[in-house]
Amino acid sequence: MASSFVIACVGKPSAGKSSFLNAVTDASAKVGNFPFTTIEPNEGIAYYPVACPCAKMGVSERCKPRHGWCEGGRRHVPVRLLDVAGLVPGASEGRGLGNQFLDDLRHADVLIHVVDASGTTDASGRETRGYDPVDDIQWLRQEVEAWIWGNLDRKWAGVVRRHVAVKASPVETLHAQLAGYGTPRDVVQRALDRLPRELVGEFSRWEAGKELRRFVGAFLDERFPTIVALNKIDMADSDKNISAIMKRYHSKGGALVDGVRIDNIVLTSALGECFLRKMQKQRYISYETGSDDFSTDAPGLKPLDEKAGRRLETIRDLVLFRYGSTGVQEAIVKAVDALGYIPVFPVKSLSTFGAPQQGAAFRDCVLVRPGTTVREFAKKLHSQVIDRGYAGAETIGGIQLGESDVIVAGKNNVIKYTVSE
Ligand SMILES: Nc1nc2c(ncn2[C@@H]2O[C@H](COP(=O)(O)OP(=O)(O)O)[C@@H](O)[C@H]2O)c(=O)[nH]1
Ligand SMILES: [Mg+2]
């Protein structure tokens, strides 16, 4: 039963995607401690913190997550991170690696667009100086849009003919076309809901270059919520570029601009985080990801040499003091929050919160889409046993849950299923 939440890191070459991945991935420290059978070279693991019911139930000392870890009721749930390399302007027309990497996107629940805010790489990722990154967010969005729209455009006349012939609804027809992008039907419906009703009513007259194009924009907003990581904030020119980007994306009422909401722009120093983690692992500093400082004089730490000491001071001044953290962990949190996923804790016993004969509590935690029902989660869980023999479900306090109850964090997200076989 794998938590299947996938974040894709996208962006032009040299923006810092791989560094971002390294910064959040703790592969060497916690090898094997994630539910994914294979980790590809371009994959990493990040951890999303959630409130663990172990604290409220007074069993924190027995809380032993199968994957990730839990500390004082704060549980760190692994999520997958994909490094989608090679996105350059014109990619959707088959330049660069062409559709290959755009195909990777279909596994993603949410995107983190890593932008080089320092202005030291041009639109294709080549080294330069004084490049203005203000358009980078827009062109990436347009690439993805051109890709999805292009695939529909080619066959649109046929799609509409069939739509009329079989008397389908717009959502059915579009869902059939977009299912390949890993898209559930309700996402297509929400994208349609973003358009004026009259427009949807005239679906059979949609032109590929007009109404369909508009729909694809709405579809992107729903299908690929995007967090922007303005990266390399430790570099000289980043400050002024950040101000310009914030100005452009500041909109009235928090509306999406190029698929981005200003609240979802995060300032990051992937390299700073990599260095802090490395120094922490080698026991030169004590540092916790996401915090606004590190310490060099905690007991048991090794003495720093001058060069490392200077570098740490620079990170402290330019990143931690100025922006409050390296921003990397914040980006992960925002990415999962953007979809409102909630943690669910399946248990075998509501008195021990584990398997009855084992000591450990709350072994499993799975992130699920908002709106997931008790019955849907049973299906997602290991499967046929619960699905075939489904006899009911209850939560803490022996409260019975209905099949169609929507799972809500803190209310009914600790679930014990009963099976009739
Ligand atoms: N100063 C600074 N350099 C960074 C940062 N993140 C990445 N880099 C550098 O930018 C270059 C490209 O980074 P990389 O992660 O390989 O980019 P990718 O092509 O998007 O995967 C490397 O030299 C990194 O060290 C950062 O936060 N600050
Ligand atoms: Mg890379």
Image (cartoon, rainbow, N blue to C red):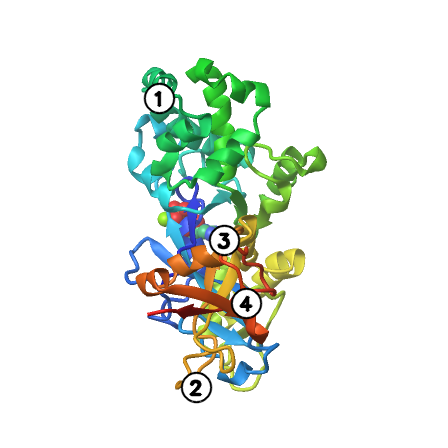
Going from N to C along the chain, the mark reached first, 3 or 1, is 1
x and y, in percent, of residue 197 in the image: 58, 23
Of the numbered discs 2 and 4, the one sitting upstream in the chain is 2
Instruction: Please state the horizontal and vertical placement of residue 76, each as a whole percent of the image.
Output: 50, 68
Q: Is residue 204 above or below residue 170?
A: above
Kind of residue indicated by mark 3: Thr
Of the numbered discs 1 and 2, the one sitting upstream in the chain is 1
Which numbered dot is residue 372? Answer: 3
Q: Which residue is at 47% across, 46% downward?
A: 110
Q: Which of marks 2 and 3 is in front?
A: 3
| Above-or-below relation of 72 to 113 | below
10 Å neighbourhood of mark 3: few (<14), some, or many (≥20)?
A: some
**For the point 32% across and 39% down, which residue is it?**
103
Verify CB contact (< 8 Å) between mark 3 and mark 1.
no
Which callout, 2 or 4, points to the residue nearer the camera? 4
The residue identified by callout 4 is 400
Tell me which label, 1 or 4, sits earlier in the chain.
Answer: 1
- Image quarter of residue 389: bottom left
* Along the line of sight, the residue nearer the viewer: 94 or 126: 94
In the rendered structure, find residue 166 and report the number of the disc placed on it: 1
Q: Mark 2 points at which residue?
A: 359
> How far apart in space, not on screen, are marks 1 and 2 (Cα)?
57 Å
**Quick check: 317 left or right of 329?**
right
Q: Which quadrant would residue 67 be assigned to in this image?
A: bottom left
Which of labels 1 and 2 is toward the front?
1
Q: Which residue type does callout 1 highlight?
A: Val
Q: Is 321 placed left or right of 119 in the picture?
A: right
Q: How far apart are marks 2 and 3 (CA)?
A: 29 Å
